[in-house]
Image (cartoon, rainbow, N blue to C red):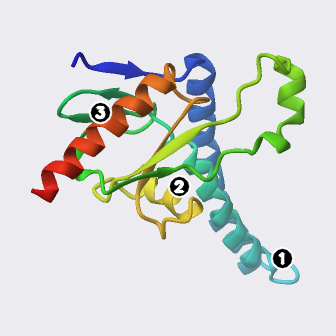
Amino acid sequence: MQPSTHIHPKPTLNRAIQYGAIITVVLLVVAAPLQVLLTLLGAPGGLFILSAFFTLVLALPVLMLTAIAPAVTVSDEGITLKPTIWKARFINWSDVQAIKPFPLLPSPESETNRKTGVGRKNYRPAEGIMLVIPSLPVQYRIAGFFAGERAAPIIALTNRAHTDYDKLAKTIGTHFKIEAQNSDK
């Protein structure tokens, strides 16, 4: 099989979102200690300490944007993740613990504005799978937490974030079945 690469359908927009997200995370992380400092310097009420905690918690879903659906190249040996912010990494098929439906996609009933914007005939519901890959670093664990995987590292492959999604999902499913059959022997 020839390796196939699947990037975001709008790569410039995706890059802008990713860099904007990382800048926002940096600003939130810098703001939290400043909020604590305001309390220590005599700001009334002590609520700045509590708001510092919430500021850091809000940084997590923003950081998730930088890792959740990276561009990928799929080959017979495995899958190469090519995120915009983080370093590229190769994952062997044997390192993929599970493939599951991705639960963080919007339902068709909740996308009335999108249906209107693209037209009912052109509308395609969101589809996606997630790969549970325990060897991935901490930034991939955030998405796992929000996807209900108890903070296991995941990546999402969706028809909204990857070109030629149908081919990608079919290829992933084929390789995972081959690996599962080989491990049963």
Badge 3 marks a residue whose secondary structure is strand
Badge 2 marks a residue whose secondary structure is helix
Q: Is residue 28 above or below residue 120?
A: below
Residue placed under numbered mark 2 in the picture: 143
Q: How many marks?
A: 3
Q: Can residue 95 be seen? A: yes
Q: Nearer the viewer, mark 1 or mark 3?
A: 3
Residue drawn 36% across the image and 39% down it? 173
| Left or right relative to 176: residue 145 | right
Amino acid tagged 3: Thr
| Left or right relative to 5: residue 145 | right
Q: Is residue 124 above or below residue 184?
A: above
Residue 110 pos. (x, y %): 84, 44
Q: Is residue 133 above or below residue 92?
A: below
Task: Say which quadrant the C terminus sits in.
Answer: bottom left
Q: Which image quarter: residue 168?
A: top left
Q: Can residue 30 be seen? A: no
- Disc on the earlier residue, 2 or 1: 1
- Disc on the earlier residue, 1 or 3: 1
Q: Nearer the viewer, mark 2 or mark 1?
A: 2
Residue 61 pos. (x, y %): 62, 54
Q: Nearer the viewer, residue 144 or 86?
A: 144
Q: Nearer the viewer, residue 154 or 102?
A: 102
- Disc on the earlier residue, 3 or 2: 3
- Residue 43, disc: 1
- Residue 80, disc: 3
Q: What's the distance in space between the residues labelled 3 and 2, CA to CA?
A: 18 Å
Q: Nearer the viewer, residue 135 or 77?
A: 77
Residue drawn 55% across the image and 19% down it? 11
